[in-house]
Image (cartoon, rainbow, N blue to C red):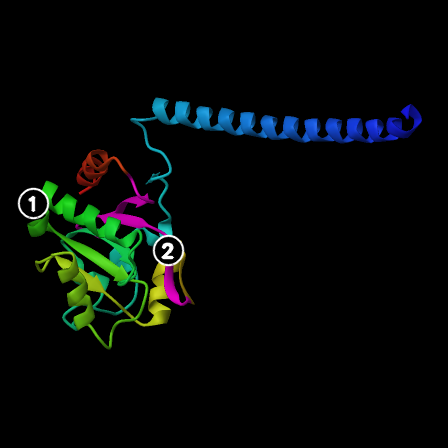
């Protein structure tokens, strides 16, 4: 009987050791992930009042002045403009997909909150909202886009252009964008706020979505 069960016992022992090793590596993996998470939380807490990925200080010279960027755009009223038309105005610019329901509502809401926080901006500046798609044939859709967010005023301009101009502008600001189709549209794009002064000089770029709105608004006002 012993001679018969010994191989089975040996096999059981080998399997048991193998399973123990797997569990050990699994537990080690969890421990490493917890350590990384704890480190990130600690870093985030320490750096709470300092810029992180959202803030970009080193500006690219090729996009140093909005007024020098070529291209003809169509606004929500069907008017054709260039970026030189916005001289003598402070600018807060961003890029959106008109029908995006992911990060674009957050972007638009941030701009609305900034307007509420800084009502004088309506007299001294413009919000420029560039579209990632060509809507020149239906500019009324861009008016509907503004109505969707209950936005009014001539200081709000939604700008569209042909695909080549949009691509060139997006490349200038190193933005990625894509709209996939799989039954439903999936909008993927870089999130950016561009702040330029009345001379067109790009003073600051903010990339991503910042949860600390008060600090974001403070930084924007600082460069206008």
Residues in magenta? 182-210
Q: Quadrant of residue 147?
A: bottom left
Q: Nearer the viewer, residue 182 or 112?
A: 182
Circle 2 is placed at which residue position?
189
Q: Is residue 80 visible in the rendered structure shown here?
A: no
Q: Is residue 126 visible in the rendered structure shown here?
A: yes
Q: CA distance from mark 1 to mark 2?
A: 29 Å
Marks 1/2 in contact by CB < 8 Å: the verdict is no
Q: Secondary structure at mark 2?
A: strand
Residue at 30 percent of width and 61 percent of height: 97
Q: Is residue 196 magenta?
A: yes
Q: Quadrant of residue 156?
A: bottom left
Circle 1 is placed at which residue position?
119
Residue 20, percent from left and from top: 69, 26
Q: Nearer the viewer, residue 1 or 121?
A: 1
Q: Is residue 199 magenta?
A: yes
Relative to residue 210, is residue 224 drawn left or right? Answer: left
Q: Quadrant of residue 168?
A: bottom left
Query: The N terminus appears in which quarter of the rendering?
Result: top right
Relative to residue 223, is residue 178 drawn left or right? Answer: right
Relative to residue 195, is residue 163 drawn left or right? Answer: right
Q: Nearer the viewer, residue 148 or 60?
A: 148
Q: Residue furthest right?
A: 3
Crowd band around label 2 with a 10 angstrom C-alpha radius: few (<14), some (14–19), many (20+)? some
Q: Secondary structure at mark 1?
A: loop
Residue 177, percent from left and from top: 39, 59
Residue at 34 percent of width and 45 percent of height: 208
């Amino acid at each position: 009987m012993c001679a018969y069960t010994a191989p089975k016992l040996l096999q059981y022992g080998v399997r048991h050791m193998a399973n123990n090793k797997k569990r050990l590596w699994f537990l080690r993996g969890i421990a490493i992930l917890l350590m990384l998470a704890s480190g990130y939380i600690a870093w985030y807490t320490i750096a709470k009042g300092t810029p992180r990925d959202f803030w970009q200080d080193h500006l690219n010279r090729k996009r140093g002045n909005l007024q020098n960027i070529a291209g003809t755009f169509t606004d929500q009223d069907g008017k054709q403009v260039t970026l030189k038309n916005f001289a003598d105005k402070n600018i807060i610019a961003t890029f959106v997909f008109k029908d995006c329901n992911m990060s674009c509502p957050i972007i638009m809401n941030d701009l609305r909150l900034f307007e509420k926080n800084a009502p004088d901006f309506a007299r001294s500046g413009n919000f420029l909202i560039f579209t990632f798609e060509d809507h020149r044939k239906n500019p009324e859709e861009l008016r509907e886009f503004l109505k969707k967010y209950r936005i009014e005023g001539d200081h709000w301009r939604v700008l569209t252009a042909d695909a080549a101009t949009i691509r060139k502008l997006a490349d200038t600001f190193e933005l990625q964008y894509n709209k996939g189709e799989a039954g439903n549209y999936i909008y993927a794009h870089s999130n950016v706020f561009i702040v330029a002064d009345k001379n067109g000089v790009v003073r600051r770029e903010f990339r991503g979505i910042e949860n600390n709105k008060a600090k974001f608004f403070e930084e924007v006002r600082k460069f206008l």
